[in-house]
Structure formats: structure tokens, C-alpha cells
Image (cartoon, rainbow, N blue to C red):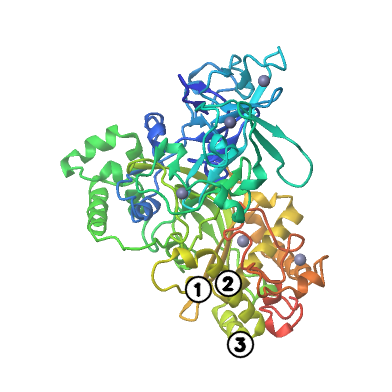
Amino acid sequence: MTTASHHRRRVGAVRPSHLMFTSGVGALVDLPNFSVLVRGLDEWSEQGSVLDPISEPRLLAAVQALPGKRAVERLLPAPWRDGIDADPKGPASTVGVPVAPFPAWLRCTACDELAPVTGPQFTFENDRPRRPHDARFFHGECGKSRRKPLAVAARFVLSCVRGHIDDFPYTRFVHGGGSCPKGSKAPRLRMEDRGGNLGANVEIRCVSCGASRNIRQALGRRKQPNLPRCRARHAHLNWFDPAGCPEDPQVLVVGASNQWFAQTLSALAVPKTGAGVLATKVEQHWTALEGLPRQMLPYARANVGALKEFALWSDDELWAAIEAHQATADEPAAEGYPDLRTAEWEIFTSPHQPEPDPDFTLSRPGVPPALRGLVDDVVQAERLREVRALIGFTRLDAPDPDDPELVTPAPLAKGNPDWVPATEVRGEGIFLRLPADLLADWAHRVAGSDALAAHQQAYARFRQNRYSDRIKGPFDPMQNWPGIRYIALHTLSHLLIRTISLECGYSSASLTERIYAGNEDDPRAGILIYTAVPDAEGTLGGLVSLAEQHDLTRLFRRALRDARHCSSDPLCAERLPAHPADFLHGAACHVCLFVSETTCERGNRFLDRRFVVPIDRPELALYPDQP
Ligand SMILES: [Zn+2]
Ligand SMILES: [Zn+2]
Ligand SMILES: [Zn+2]
Ligand SMILES: [Zn+2]
Ligand SMILES: [Zn+2]
């Protein structure tokens, strides 16, 4: 990471994958001695251009279909070069994600002086290139200490649900919304942390006039009148949105988990169902092939590195595939939020196994006899490649994966950049398809149940509470309700993930799920559990081997047996969402069902053991009997 103050200086190292999932453009990153905000893509661009784009046409097309993303032409990895440990002053040290110190107010740890980072009080020191984490600010002329005491970030900022973030207006706040009666525009301030364990107890004091005010008077929704209107500032872009902002800002503390949520799209690199390897490769390398005249083909094949992959095919075969692809590329793209799952579901359930490929290889070990009727198909995904693109971020509220426009995402750049950051992960996985008639019979059985009604009502409350005031026009509280099948499949997925990590020593955080759940008209019922450990080459066969008949039987039996009890029972077993609460799970908790944030595709919502195994009422269970 580099800061853009004066000239670029390295202030720390973060793996690129980390920059995608836990912090990325617009995120506040806590460094040991201060905190920084990851700058927008305008600042990345000069560095980004040195990197090879990640090829994933299906994902790129999906990104382009989003509002404001038409100009995106490339998915680029975060700027990163290996070798910083071996050679701290070498080429790797000049490559990084640009950041700027934020919040832009610092507090002296010795005398409590509170002042902007740009003021004369504080000096930046970063003289040890081998230890970028030692970068720090200090108070040069401190009245309390001669030993250049450390200055740290004053940790309060303002944010709103439109993703704006701004410095806390300390000077105005301490003077009750006005200016200092002593006339100074920038009066000297102190920030005194009174400690105690009743939340924040931080006193702001003006040295010039003696006014003082506790930060508690700005915390909480009811205290919002004590704060100014949102200034529509996107600090990561160094920009105030000229359209302004109608939202009330809230105080956010640096380090709070709701300061930044990634909005990402991900796709598995899957061949089109029934398409041969050649057609798939043509699609992958379309940027290199598009517009190439027929007579240039032999020359391009001899000289363009990426085209070496076509060595197995003649010029005529390749040309025919290019023409076939051109015909489909000319078809108009579908409108609306992209569906990236259908192509995946189709290939996992296709009776024609795709030809093995370094990005996608499947095999079928067969359904174990003990699980017949419970599972219809078992697929080992020996090789998978997942590409994930960062398309925006939100603050205060996480984006809804199925209804991304409910939460207003903040922009990644001032303009419309021609790229978005992306990561690429290779791994392996297990895909299970459940029998369509089993799901249909069960869905029919639970259709009129109180338990299902409780989940649906909670969903409506959840949406009403969060979003109803943000929707213009009619508000349908049940829009994008994932459905009861989703809850059952999702719960089964968590049960299997937890059993796999218990039995096999995987950290459950290294596994990820994808749920393919349909409804009455759409018989999809599948689960993919796969490794998504960035920067590692998957787990090399460990996970797929668990889909062998003997292991899968054992795992499945244990998962279903364990699901019947939780050490928090009867509290957990009896739980159903009820008015006025709007949480979205039933019999589920940290002890029995929750998994890490990176593993779950729905933030541990839509989970309930009673829909999978008998807990209180056996007729609700998808699997009433233990196999
Ligand atoms: Zn000081
Ligand atoms: Zn004052
Ligand atoms: Zn705002
Ligand atoms: Zn539980
Ligand atoms: Zn989940």
C-alpha cells in the first residue's frame, strides 16, 4: 500500500485477495499507527495497466450489463508484485494500492491535541523501508513530552447509507454547531478519552474558549439533530457529489464492521453446455481473436503467446470456431441484473460431461447406495476457477445479493473506468443434486405450516424496516424472497460444511458455498461446496475425495445426525422469527449452523434445522429418517 501524501510511500502490505473481500476501494484499513482509506480506481489506473487482465467473458459481460458499467472492458487483478520481503527497495515496493490517511484528524497520545493531519502539528515518519508497518505520525512540539509522542487517528467519522464518508466536524460540534466565540477559524482542540465501559466517553474541548462537548451527544439515531447534514463526500475519491445527499449522517467508529461492505459478482469459469473445448477456448481468448482477418491467423498464432493454446487445431478449424463465436457475440445482451448461476447449474447437471480442462474438470463417483433417494447425483469438480469482480461497495447496510439496488452502492471511481478489480481463485468442489420430486413433495408438505409463515413474515418485516423508505413507487416486501427450498438447501449446505471442517481439518473459512434453488416452476435443487482459498492452489484433491461413496455416506450421516441436536437446545430448536424481531433464521445459531462470513453466500440468513431433520415437528423435515 502506498500513501499519496507528498510522494508515494509504502505504508504496509496486504495480500491482493484481502483487498477484495475484507477491504477494497473505499474501505478504511487500520494500520498499526493510523488508518487509511483505499483510494478510488482513478488513482489505481496507472499501476493497474501493467497487469494482465483476468479472462472470464461471462463475468465481464455480467459486469457490463450493470448500470454505469458499460465502459468496463477488463477485469484486472489488484496491483501486486511478489518479492517485497526479499528486496524491500526493489520493484515490488513501487507497486501498490494507493491509500490516503483517513480520518484526516489525529490526536496526540501524550497531550490529547486534536488537529488535522495536514496541520503543522504533526510530522510523518517512514524511514524504515523494511518495516512499512512502522510508518507513523508524531506530535513535533508536544507540551507534555519531548520524545516525539505518537499521534493516532481520531477515530470518529461520519457516514450515511449512500456510502458517503466524511471527517467528524469537531470544531463545529464542540461549539454547538457554530464557530468559536474567540474568533479563531481553527481553534486548538483537545480530545480526551475518559475511558470507562459505557461505550464511547470522549470529551472534545476547545482550548481557546473552553467549550467542551462529549462525543456521546452525537451517537445514536436520536442524536442526529446534533450533526450537520451529509456533505455527500466520497473521501476515497476526494470528491463531493454535486447532486448532494438527503440522508442523515451517522457517527461511525474506525474499525466498525459496517464501515464497508464489498459488492461483488462472481462466476465459475464453466464451458457452455455441450460446447467443445475449442469453442470454449475461443470465448476465453476472444479479445485476442476478435477482428483478426483470416489471412492473419497463421501469423497471429505464431506470434501471440496466448494463442499457443490452439496448437491442437488447424487454421480452418479455428477459423470456423471464430466465425461461430462472432455470430453469437452479435446477439443483443440480456437486460437487467445478470444471472450467473444458470450456466453453472446447466453444466453441473448436464448428462454430457465437458471435456477436461485446466479450469473445469468434472467426474462422477456415483451416488452411494445408502443415500439413494436423498441425493440424485454427486459430481466431483476436480478443477474449478472462480473469478470475482468488485463492482461497488456500501456502508452501514450490506448489499442484498438478489436485490443490489436496495442499498445505494458508492462508486469505485469518479468517471466510468474501463476496468474493475478482480481476483481469480483456483480450487475444487463437490456438487450435489437433490431429487426434484423429493423437494416438490416436501415443499407441498410445509406449504401451509406456521414455521414457513413465520419465515415469510420475518422477511417482509426485515425488508420493510430497512428499505421501505428508500423505494420510490410501490414496495413489494416479498420481492426476491428466496423461497423455502432455498432455506432447506442452504441449511444442508451449512451442515455439510461444518461436518467437513470437523472431520477433515479444513478451516470452514476456506470453503465457500453456492446454492442452486428453484421454485415450483423451476426444479433446480443443488449445492456446490468448494475451496476458495485465495493465493493458494486449492487443496489438491482433499475435498473432492470426500465425494467418494464411502466418505460421502459417512459425512452425510454425521451431518444429519448432528443436526438433530444443538447444545443451545431447547432455545435453539424452538426459535422461529417472530414479531417484532426481523432476524432471518429459525433453529440455527453459532453452535450448530453458522459459518464464517466468507463462507456463507447469504450472511447466515435463511437457515433452519427443522426444515432438514426432525426437530420439533417431523413433518417439516426434508429428511425425516436418518439414512
Ligand atoms: Zn502532544
Ligand atoms: Zn472555541
Ligand atoms: Zn450522504
Ligand atoms: Zn443451535
Ligand atoms: Zn450460507
Q: Quick one: 2 or 429, which is closer to the camera? A: 2
Asked whether the viewer can see residue 8, the reply is: yes
Question: What residue is rendered at 79% in x and 41% in y?
Answer: 196
How much space separates mark 2 and mark 1, taking CA atoms?
8 Å
Mark 2: is the Cβ under 8 angstroms from ligand 5? no
Say whether residue 536 is visible: no
Q: Secondary structure at mark 2?
A: helix
Looking at the rendered structure, the kind of residue marked 3 is Gly
Q: What kind of residue is marked 2?
A: Arg
**How far across and how far down the image is residue 16, in percent?**
53, 37
The residue tagged 3 is 448
Q: Earlier in the sequence, mark 2 or mark 3?
A: 3
Say which residue label 1 marks: 477
Density class for disc 1 (Cα within 10 Å; few <14, some 14-19, many ≥20) is some
Location of mark 2 (residue):
461
**Earlier along the polypeptide chain: callout 2 or callout 1?**
2
Could you tell me how far apart the alpha carbons at marks 3 and 1 are, in whole angstroms? 19 Å
Is disc 2 in contact with disc 1, using a CB cutoff of under 8 Å?
Answer: yes
Residue 359 lies left or right of residue 567; in this view the side is left
